[in-house]
Image (tube, rainbow, N blue to C red):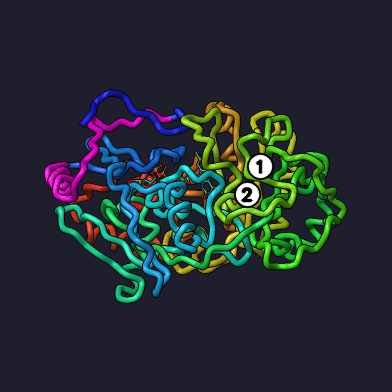
Amino acid sequence: MTSQSETNWAGNLTYSAARLHRPKTTTHLQDIIRHSRKVRALGSRHSFNTIADTPHDLISLEHFDKIGTVDTERSQVTIGGGVRYGQLCRQIDHAGFALPNLASLPHISVAGACATATHGSGDGNGNLATAVVGLEMISADGDLITLTKEQDGDQFLGAVVGLGGLGIITKLTLQLVPAFNMRQDVYEYLPLEQLENHLDVITGSGYSVSLFTAWRKGLIEQVWVKRRVDIPFVGRDFFGATSAEIDLHPIRELSPIHCTAQMGVPGAWYDRLSHFRLEFTPSSGEELQSEYFIPRHNALAAFRAMYEMGDQIAPLLQISEIRTIAADNLWMSPCYQQDCVAIHFTWHKDWAGVRQLLPLIEARLIPLAARPHWGKLFTVSAKQLQPLYPKLPAFRHLLEQYDPQGKFRNPFLEQTIFAGS
Ligand SMILES: Cc1cc2nc3c(=O)[nH]c(=O)nc-3n(C[C@H](O)[C@H](O)[C@H](O)COP(=O)(O)OP(=O)(O)OC[C@H]3O[C@@H](n4cnc5c(N)ncnc54)[C@H](O)[C@@H]3O)c2cc1C
């Protein structure tokens, strides 16, 4: 147990918790939860807001890092609540399996990512939480609870993107797919007009497609297309964009040394789906992030709004990324029952400036039914947020059922989920 100041990955947040625990056994974990008044799990600390924070006891699951043997009959693996994607990917790949998708960085914990509906890209790919088929957690009174997709219907759908509010997850079971190889090709300077005319073809041109833009000059600076190598390659011409001649970082001026291989070089799924290499471990980041999920039918209106704001956005922006995510049935997922286009912003580390700008961006995007990323920075009020989630009242009941005393409730949940209830 430690009590010195602990910060998140970006260093923009010092957790207010009085204590940080690192239990090694389930019994010890149960004991901490039973004796705490306010408690939260801490993942790999990659969230930018206060979602993980609590005034009393933070619990790191870093010692819950066991990865079970792959159940080859069911194509499933059960992992500890502290496992990170990087560890997991290599092990399941050795067994001939893959995860359907990954986020931009492989260093994030699986439980923390699923709790906030972290996602990658791909028209046919759900967010990372959609791979969960079972979970084990310790509830507020210290009991061990298991929920499965097969047996627990609505309770399961409500619990997977649980925002850390239902309990501390000790195990997750994930549905796998057969391992596959991919290639990654980068194209430069896609005219916005082409995106407006061919959005579906462009985002559907690979297994996972990311568009990087600074919202200037009517251009998308880079398009990263990740294709399975077993699907024929369409060629070098890409809607007026040119094939990059060298490896690129999404921010052109930066070295691509830490990026996963490009230029069509084939490689394992986990070494292409993430943008950044596993071997590169960034311990902290000089950035802030925000992201909004827009129903796909409103995507073009959202892009136009952001290009109109290009001059206001530019001074604070490092780069924006546009990705697509398939609809799912997880209650608190921003893609609940709607295919989405996500607009992400990597900001300079200037919270004073970003805090002024976000309400202006949100004033353009919320009328388009945009839902903010649970783990990134936003200023949307509970009044604006709550109507965007049809299952939010049911989720609130679920939180009250699993945690009647509000042990896992923190200021973030009070402000987003419970305000006005
Ligand atoms: C460099 C960088 C790149 C990123 N890339 C992407 C991206 O590509 N796509 C995307 O969607 N997001 C991305 N994110 C955001 C990130 O994936 C989310 O914020 C995610 O929730 C972080 O997971 P974490 O393990 O760090 O959890 P934390 O930030 O530590 O915690 C997040 C939430 O998960 C809960 N939690 C963690 N572990 C458990 C557990 N065992 N049981 C119960 N609850 C738990 C916490 O209580 C908290 O509520 C990125 C962030 C960074 C810093």
Residue 281 pos. (x, y %): 50, 35
Q: Is residue 228 left or right of residue 114?
A: right
Task: Identify the image quadrant of the C terminus.
Answer: bottom left
Query: Decide: marks 2, 1 in contact (CB < 8 A)?
Result: yes
Closer-to-camera residue (386/262): 262
Residue 387 can be seen, yes or no: no
* Residue at 45% in and 49% down: 85
Q: At label 2, which amino acid type do we have?
A: Ile
Q: Which residue is mark 2?
A: 343
Provide the secondary structure element on which disc 1 rests.
strand
* Residue at 42% in and 59% down: 332
Does 277 sit above or below residue 183?
Answer: above
Is tag 2's residue or tag 1's residue first in the polypeptide sequence? 1
Q: Is residue 397 left or right of residue 296?
A: left
Q: Which mark is residue 172?
A: none
Quadrant assignment for ligand 1: top left
Residue 135 pos. (x, y %): 31, 62
Q: Which residue is mark 1?
A: 320
The residue at the far front in this view is 94
Residue 418 can be seen, yes or no: yes
Q: Is residue 349 left or right of residue 410?
A: right
Q: Quadrant of residue 15?
A: top left
Residue 52 pos. (x, y %): 35, 41
Q: Which residues are magenta?
A: 13-36
Does 236 sit above or below residue 354?
Answer: below
Badge 2 crowding class, 10 Å Cα cut-off, few under 14, some 14 to 19, many 20 or more, is: many
Provide the secondary structure element on which disc 2 rests.
strand
Residue 310 pos. (x, y %): 73, 38
Numbered label tally: 2
Tell me how far mark 2 sits from mark 1, CA to CA.
7 Å
Task: Identify the image quadrant of the N terminus.
Answer: top left
